[in-house]
Image: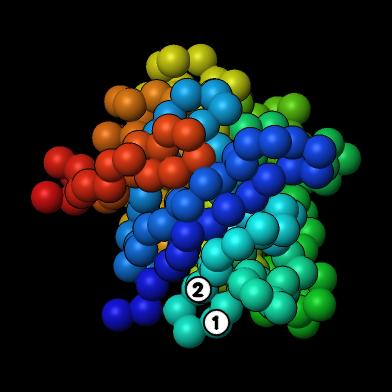
Amino acid sequence: MSTLALEDLQVRYPGADAFVLNGLSLTLPLGSIACLLGPSGCGKSTALRAIAGFEPLSEGRVLLGDRVLSGPGVHLPPEQRGVGLLFQEIALFPHLTAAANVGFGQRRRPGAERDQRVRELLALVGLEELGSRMPHELSGGQQQRVALARALAPSPRLLLLDEPFSNLDSATRDRLVVEVRDILRAAGQTALMVTHDPEEAEAMGDWIGVMAGGRLVAWRPTRVAA
């Protein structure tokens, strides 16, 4: 089966003595959802940036299926990686409707094809009746689902989520974690999320990786996966 593979990733910021990532390795089957869990400073967000192509590696390789994204002599730019991103800052375009936000990155598609893709994604995230709403007319949870649909619009092979629920109230966060997990599974989407919340990781992931000191110290399936 094809996989996301991180092989002995090392990242050190210019001028720093210590590595932020220091031998991070994992293998995630495509179609699975994994969560990297750990406190601030453990390297989990840097790992996402390295996978996305925003952070060059000092050593190691990132592979997605049979493609080397980063490695010795190889560094594909972010836009060529087939990797989608969802951050804690929702950052919808305030002057565009929900539908227009979802379709923003699809402007090269023919109009009818783009409109069909937007309708499919709004239905997938349960907002098919709200496509004409402006962002300020949506709740925080609805805005994050629009952002998820926008991230899924290009059909990325891998979706990276950087603490996407941390700015939401606890009730909305608990509900949205389950909703997003079910949406990703329905789409067959491979995803890697970082969080500092163990309960969120257990609810969201098929796999959990615990990070400390820039490396993986535990990697196991969750009760959800089992």
Q: Quadrant of residue 209?
A: top left
Q: Residue at x 27, y 35 (%)?
A: 202
Q: Is residue 170 above or below residue 110?
A: above
Q: Residue at x 72, y 58 (%)?
A: 56
Secondary-structure class at tag 2: strand
- Compare residues 195 and 128 and report the one nearer the observer: 195
Q: Is residue 52 visible?
A: no
On the image, the x and y values in percent for residue 115 come to: 69, 69
Q: Are marks 2 and 1 in contact (CB under 8 Å)?
A: yes
Q: Residue at x 74, y 42 (%)?
A: 13
Number of other residues with Cα within 10 Å of mark 1, as a class: few under 14, some 14 to 19, many 20 or more = few
| Cα separation between marks 2 and 1 | 5 Å
Tell me the kind of residue under disc 1.
Answer: Arg
For residue 93, the mark is none
On the image, the x and y values in percent for residue 36 come to: 42, 41
Q: Residue at x 44, y 15 (%)?
A: 170
In this picture, residue 170 sits left or right of residue 27: right
In this picture, residue 89 sits left or right of residue 1: right
For residue 67, the mark is 1
On the image, the x and y values in percent for residue 118 come to: 63, 63
What residue did someone put label 2 on?
64
Number of other residues with Cα within 10 Å of mark 2, as a class: few under 14, some 14 to 19, many 20 or more = many
In this picture, residue 41 sits left or right of residue 29: right
Q: Is residue 95 above or below residue 125?
A: above
Q: Is residue 101 visible?
A: yes
